[in-house]
Image (spheres, grey):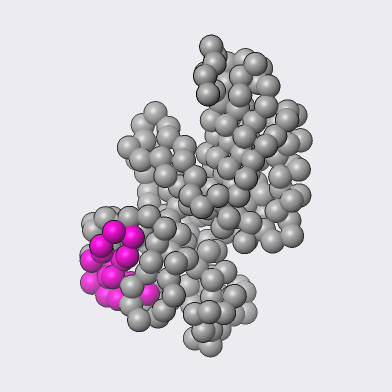
Amino acid sequence: LGAESPFGQGVRHGHGPVSGGVTVTEASGPTVTELDDRPAYDVWHELVSDIAGEDLDIDLEALATDDEEFVKLLTQFEFGIETSGGQYKIRWPGLTDSTDGPLHFATAIPEGTELFLMDSNQEAQLSAQLAACDNAAESTEGDYAGAIAFNCICQANILGEQFGDGVSDMAAQLDAPLAGMEVYGEVGLDDDDMRGYHNATSAVLLLPE
């Protein structure tokens, strides 16, 4: 794609931190074996268990790894990597299929990375989609002819039946033709970013007229 005017870009997610940082002390590629020198799954379980019980009435101890609720918890309670601007890039541990110790992510997590447990809900996801549209519109220098939206499958899992309403709201917010898709992993690189890979995030590209 090419144009005489710059493309607009917006990237936003609907997760916020609910824990202090834990450090990746053993990892290989996307598999994190230890957090703070402890089995990684045990740390995630400990951080999530009380919240899941109090806010969602879910007993994490009673769930099998092939239960739908288990996958939903891995999607709602993801991890974030804090950026230099005080924001977070989301990392999804949803490929974890056992409680034996490791967490399996969708992308490499280097040793020494500090991770923060994140939480989200439907309202926050819908707001993030609209914020990505606003962010993209603010980055343009003129009118735009349309938009392409890349929304994560994790957002669709959290939103459920509201996902379609969220897409309609995005189109109304932009007041322009909108095309898009659900994807596994989104890309959006800001000027000061070293890495532009995201999970559970809306990435919006505006096409200049």
Q: In which quarter of the image is residue 105?
A: bottom left
Residue 182, placed above or below residue 8: below
Outermost residue toward the top in this view:
4
Main SS of residues in magenta: strand
Count of picture labels: 0
Residue 63, placed above or below residue 17: below
Residue visible at 47% across and 72% down? 48
Q: Which of 86 and 107 is in front in this view?
A: 107
Residue visible at 40% across and 80% down? 99
Q: Quadrant of residue 128?
A: top right
In which quadrant will I find the C terminus?
A: top right
Q: Position of residue 132 (x, y in %)?
A: 59, 38
Q: Nearer the viewer, residue 52 or 111?
A: 111
Segment colored magenta: 26-41
Q: Position of residue 38 (x, y in %)?
A: 27, 75
Q: Does the magenta stretch include residue 47?
A: no
Residue 103, placed above or below residue 133: below
Can residue 19 be seen here?
Answer: no
Residue visible at 71% across and 45% down? 167
Q: Where is residue 185 in the image (x, y as percent from the top left)?
A: 48, 49
Q: Where is residue 12 in the image (x, y as percent from the top left)?
A: 54, 42
Residue visible at 38% across and 49% down? 82
Can residue 150 be seen here?
Answer: yes
